Image: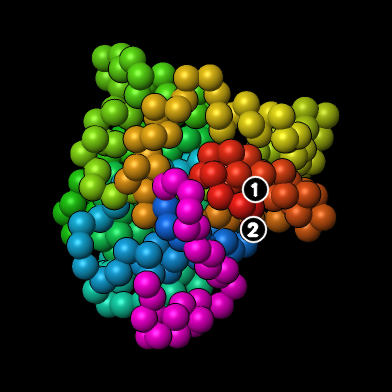
Amino acid sequence: MDTEDDALRHLRLAGVIRLGLGGGRGPRDAYIFDPHRLALPSWAFALGESGPPALLVSLDRHLDVVVPRRPEAVPDRSAGLRALDEHARWSLDVRNYDHILAAMEAGLVGDALLVARTRPRGSFAGDTYVDTRGRAHRLVTVSTVDRAAEAWNHPAPGDAVRDVLEAASQVLLDVDLDCFTSLSDADPTTVLPWPKSIVREFLLPEGSEPFWDAVLGKAVALTLAREPHHCGGLLASGELFRDVAEVLFRELLRVEPP
């Protein structure tokens, strides 16, 4: 149960909605916001100022692994929630693609399992990121949940999905709403939200239950970035959020959608 001090600290996170997820399976709390960089203070709140870093399991259209402009300036998690919140808002890139490596610099995230289809310009290209404190972080990248589930169920030589999940003591599950969109072939500036049936097919492909059991069994928090400018605008992103919430919350986490 939260203490009064916990509740007051969370109220300082402007633009972050915190939801309790009791009664389902998986994480106990969800944090919903628009700019993805607000995942950094949300993870800090969920994990606290001490303890082992978590494995990040992220579902996104983009691989948000651009190195922060000044990685050595990212506060350590021991600096506290306010320092990390201010850094996310004022120092991370407004394009929202450097928060994952910033979380590694802060000591919040250890390894990362990244389900994503596109790589932003300037993103880190290796499979191990060594932060400015000298800690090594594995970056395991797959394009779909189906591919992650296959690597969990039947690992091929070189697959590391099972390795990072089994090594983790806790998991942060992170979802960007634009994971469930595609760019139009006719006009690359037009974003096409997926219908609910395709969202379900992507999130819950046949054979993925053992993979999701492994993720949710260690998940301590869900973060969900809405980023309407990447999802077709406010109205389109609102409709997409409704459809994704039905699948993500009701079908995967087995709780009522927000």
Query: What percent of the width, then of the height, locates residue 228?
Result: 71, 55
Q: Is residue 80 above or below residue 190?
A: below
Q: Residue at x 48, y 53 (%)?
A: 23
Q: Tell me the kind of residue under disc 1.
A: Ala
Image position of 165 (left or right of 186): left
Q: Residue at x 50, y 23 (%)?
A: 146
Which circle marks residue 16 in the picture?
Answer: none
What secondary structure is marked by label 1?
helix
Q: Residue at x 77, y 38 (%)?
A: 192
Q: Mark 1 — residue?
A: 245
Q: Taking the image as drawn, is residue 60 in sight?
A: no
Which circle marks residue 258 in the picture?
Answer: 2
Q: Tell me the kind of residue under disc 2.
A: Pro
Magenta residue span: 1-26
Dividing the picture into quarters, in which one does residue 80 lie?
bottom left
Quadrant showing the C terminus:
bottom right
Q: Is residue 66 above or below residue 34?
A: above
